[in-house]
Image (cartoon, rainbow, N blue to C red):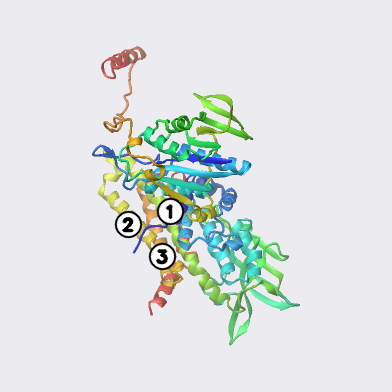
Amino acid sequence: MNFDLTAEQEMIRRTIKEFADEEVAPGALERDLAKTFPVGIFKQLGKMGMMGLPFPEEYGGAGADTVSFAIVTEELSRACASTGITYSAHISLGGAPLNLFGTSKQKQEYLTPICTGESLGAFGLTEPDAGSDAGGTKTTASEADEEFVINGSKCFITNASYAKHLAVTAITGEKNEKKEISAIIVPTDQKGFTVIDKYEKMGLNASNTTELVLEDVRVSKDHLLGKRGDGFKQFLITLDGGRIGIGAMAVGIAQAAYEKALQYAQGRKQFGQSLSKFQAIQFKLADMAMEIELARTMVFKAAWLKDQGRVFTKEASMCKLYASEVCNRVTNQAVQIHGGYGYMKEFHVERYMRDGKLLEIGEGTSEIQRMVIARQIGC
Amino acid sequence: MNIFVLLKRTFDTEEKIVISNGSIVEDGAEFIINPYDEYAVEEAIQIRDSQGGEVTVVSVGGEEAEKQLRTALAMGADKAVLINIEDDIENGDQFTTSKILAEFLQGKEADLILAGNVAIDGGSGQVGPRVADLLDIPYITTITNITVDGTSVKIVRDVEGDSETIEAALPLLVTAQQGLNEPRYPSLPGIMKAKKKPLEELELDDLDLDEDDVEAKTKTIEIFLPPKKEAGKVLEGELDVQVKELVSLLHSEAKVI
């Protein structure tokens, strides 16, 4: 057993922590209020080579491991969860399926701009009637003149306004009375493709969440990602990796909330002593510290398994489920410790609470995670 | 150009310093590249990028300093040298460090040596100038700008808040002041490549030095923390009463007049 980070992981942690503190955290409050996407931060991350973190060097990536991805996602999320989710989705939903299932020509064309940061990564899966139940997918891709003609709509798609292309899932036929779902890479400037970013969200206000409308969008057949009919399988594999990202985000937000709560409890005096001297508050802080530590360890374990090339489906679900629920408890208690001030935006913790809620929902709700774990343990 | 940077591993400035049994507790503390040395590394990389050549980062210290050297390599330095004195020297001082560095740099034909203005831990600001003196080359401290043109160098240095412009010639040693540049974040590919870059480890023996040759010229008698800051006092009442009270307090309590 060894719980130490490697020299590279440690250096990545330091670098991204410093970057997060100096460049990402300062504007987080204002970006949330004004709902401005952190374009400049992603330009800088691109320059630092962070946008292609786990992808092969031949496509402009850095060839780093999943543990490093978790570290970067956690640190960015600690400073600004909107930045964190943008990064996590960029890597694990946008870049990863291209890297896993794309041909080398597709990778050259579509993964490279993701690695450089020229395009953000996005994945068009969720539909108004189909989330984790992909069977509800209604988007279709019919064939005409050696082309796919895609029609349908997608919802809650992260990063699409800043993506030059993205993979969407669509029904390409029927097999044994079951829908055949495939993933197809579609340039977002293709005729008939509309990206709408009009959502009014509870949190993660500085991230880009969109609806996609596809009306007779035509792409040549070489835009098929991986094997025909593999769309469902691909998206399950993609989400396994994505869940590590969500887990890491949850740890980052929880860490930020805990740090703020601890600092406040030490400074704030009531009834003649610091809040941190009251056992009621101490116990809350002790629970926070413990749960965050456990959540981070679980995220790292899932990431480590993935890096070893082992099966990590169950652990990815566990880390996502546990960390996101910890995040919600911790952020809630951080607001509680702050009292009335915590309810004020200026004190940050209410933002953590709003941002953190998404983590129990996105990339499979907590209920779906329990289903995945139950299946994995043989229920 | 053959560029050398002198680098020290120091406490993170944000660390809370704890003293136990007369020495500073290092367990669990975060260590960084001395911030002034970081300016030196950045400047060295920029000069190399515009003039060509090679940047070698040198540190005198223990095994742990490898981390800071690797960070400099990740930023873009080409080579690193760790002069490991862990087993040989218990108590070194500025003399020790500069003697070792000068011995190492002797015969290396350095065109430009960059160091930090001071280290944020010891804060003596002596090592750079001492090394230059031992190598018999000129030095300029607290620089905020440097332009190299062939072998002539134009430098702006900070003089207690004012600027002084100096022309000099290579070889030269300079020490970096805040404002010289904005050190880059190591890039991720830089971090991944840092492990593969050469890092040479030397000991006193390799430099033909004995412990006696570098024995410290100073002795640390005591290490203590500054007195804890007491809560301030707010004077109240009429202005002339306040003034009288202030004067008497300055006399009797603060004992400054």
Q: Earlier in the sequence, mark 3 or mark 2?
A: 2
Look at the numbered disc 1 and give the secondary structure of its residue: helix
Nearer to the camera, B33 or A266: B33
- Judged from the image, the secondary structure of the residue bearing numbered disc 3 is helix
In the shown orientation, is residue B47 left or right of residue B24?
Answer: right
Q: CA distance from mark 1 to mark 2?
A: 22 Å
Badge 2 is on which residue?
Answer: A290
B77 vs B173, nearest the viewer: B173
Kindly report the distance in space between the C-alpha atoms of the residues bearing marks 3 and 2: 15 Å
Q: Quadrant of the C terminus of chain A?
A: bottom left
The reply to whether discs 3 and 1 touch (Cβ–Cβ < 8 Å) is no
- x and y percent of residue A329 in the render? 37, 57
Residue flagged by tag 3: what amino acid is it? Cys
Single out the residue that lies furthest toward the right. A145
Whichever of callouts 1 and 2 sits on the residue coming sooner in the sequence is: 1
Residue bearing mark 1? A10
Q: Chain of mark 3?
A: A
Q: Classify mark 2: helix, strand or loop.
A: helix
Residue A79 visible (yes or no): no
Find disc 3 in the rendering and name its residue: A319
Q: Residue at x 33, y 16 (%)?
A: B242
Q: Is A40 above or below relative to B97? A: below
